[in-house]
Image (cartoon, grey):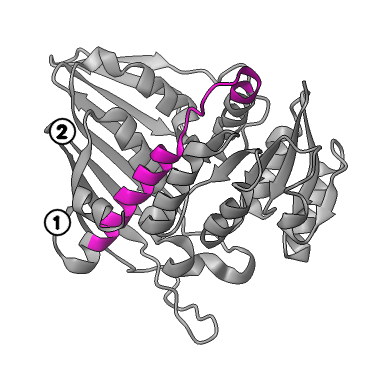
């Protein structure tokens, strides 16, 4: 059974999805849609040797096509809710790029609507499929009850997007939603219990301050510290810096339990496992999943994400990455942003119920 895709939004991530699909034998991309000419040309370029899709300016023209089984939505963040409202009028399976939405009320609406949607709704939080993060999740039982999780991302600034939409919080949801939803998703996978409180400090200290778009200077954060407390008594921390292009590792992750510790990096090829004894540590070498045929921007995780999505469609399984996962990753980012703005700790449940 060939899974036939339609791609909505063919900018950088939309084309990354196409590149991953192009090395699979059991899929077809039959239609692509983007309102801008240049991204449509990019899509045709990456499809050229493998697919011959119909090319559309308006995504709504492909929603009712009977020859499409699954949609990938990789349009700008602020468009997700409107596109999904239209998708929910169909029965199609859909992979929705992160972040799920840019406002909490929209994310709650989408989560509710997904419950009654006939097709699978899968959120594109693919970092959990990266080789070292996947291995770290596998080895969690080795360290007992998790008490602490620390994630550091030191990287390059945001890349330019078509129309410069990603320079403003109103379009992206803010840095802690747009980028860091991946890390909040990992925290929620690693740390037991439910997140209850966020405490954060951050700023726009270096990046984009000399830029102006129609007289408006970008307002996206480029650094932050975030602490998330869980009702289990465990806590997690994010250390974000987006003006650290020369870092040896883009991400460093440490998870500590009451019986040991796990450490890994992205990129990387090992997980370091230690017990509560000096010199007890050992490195476990990690190899790329043999299924991966395209590593791409995310170390093979986007490829594996699609293989899992395809298997779920064929086997009639629920999504492994749900709209609830997407909602919680957005919620933590928004709580952290609110903490920065207010200078106060934010009660996560109160924030959630205030929008319901």
Instruction: Measuring from the top left, give residue 318's x and y in whole percent.
Output: 51, 26
Indicate the position of residue 190 as horizontal and vertical percent values: 30, 29
Asked whether residue 312 is drawn in magenta, I would say yes
Q: Classify the position of the C terminus by image quarter.
A: bottom left
- Name the residue at 20% across, 26% down: 256
Return the residue nearer the eye: 26 or 146: 26
The segment highlighted magenta reads 311-338
Residue 217 inside the magenta-drawn segment = no
The residue where tag 1 is placed is 345
Is residue 251 left or right of 228 when viewed as pictured? right
Picture quadrant of residue 339:
bottom left
The secondary element bearing badge 2 is classed as loop
In this view of the protein, which residue sits in the foreground, 126 or 132?
A: 126
Badge 1 crowding class, 10 Å Cα cut-off, few under 14, some 14 to 19, many 20 or more, is some
- Which label is found at residue 298? none
Residue 227: % across, % down: 20, 47
Q: Nearer the viewer, residue 4 or 110?
A: 110
Marks 2 and 1, how far apart at CA: 16 Å
What residue do we see at 62% from left, 53% from top? 86
Q: In which quarter of the image is the N terminus?
A: top right
User: In this figure, which residue is indicated by the disc labeled 2?
Assistant: 234
Dividing the picture into quarters, in which one does residue 278 lie? top left
């Amino acid at each position: 059974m060939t899974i036939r895709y339609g791609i909505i939004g063919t900018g950088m991530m939309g084309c990354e999805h196409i590149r991953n699909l192009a090395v699979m034998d059991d899929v077809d991309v039959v239609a692509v849609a983007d309102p801008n000419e240049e991204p449509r040309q990019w899509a045709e370029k990456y499809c050229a040797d493998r697919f011959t899709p119909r090319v559309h300016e308006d995504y709504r023209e492909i929603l009712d096509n009977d020859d499409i089984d699954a949609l990938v939505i990789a349009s700008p963040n602020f468009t997700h809710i409107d596109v999904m409202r239209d998708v929910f009028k169909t029965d199609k399976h859909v992979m929705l790029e992160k972040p799920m939405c840019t406002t909490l009320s929209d994310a709650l609406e989408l989560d509710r609507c997904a419950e009654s949607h006939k097709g699978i709704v899968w959120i594109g939080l693919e970092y959990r499929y990266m080789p070292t993060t996947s291995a770290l999740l596998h080895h969690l039982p080795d360290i007992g009850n998790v008490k602490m999780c620390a994630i550091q991302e030191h990287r390059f600034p945001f890349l330019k997007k078509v129309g410069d939409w990603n320079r403003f919080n109103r379009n992206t949801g803010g840095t802690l939603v747009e980028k860091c939803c991946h890390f909040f998703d990992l925290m929620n996978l690693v740390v037991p219990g439910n997140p209850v409180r966020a405490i954060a400090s951050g700023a726009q200290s270096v990046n984009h301050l000399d830029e102006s778009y129609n007289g408006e200077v970008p307002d996206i954060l480029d650094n932050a510290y975030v602490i998330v407390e869980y009702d289990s008594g465990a806590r997690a921390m994010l250390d974000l810096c987006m003006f650290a292009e020369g870092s040896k590792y883009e991400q460093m992750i440490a998870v500590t339990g009451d019986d040991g510790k796990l450490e890994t990096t992205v990129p990387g090829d090992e997980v370091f496992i230690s017990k509560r004894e000096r010199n007890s540590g050992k490195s476990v070498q990690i190899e790329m999943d043999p299924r991966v045929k395209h590593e791409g921007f995310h170390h093979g995780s986007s490829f594996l994400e699609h293989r899992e999505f395809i298997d779920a469609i064929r086997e009639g399984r629920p999504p492994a990455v749900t709209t609830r996962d997407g909602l919680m990753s957005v919620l933590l980012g928004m709580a952290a942003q609110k903490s920065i703005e207010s200078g106060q700790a934010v009660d996560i449940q109160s924030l959630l119920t205030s929008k319901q």
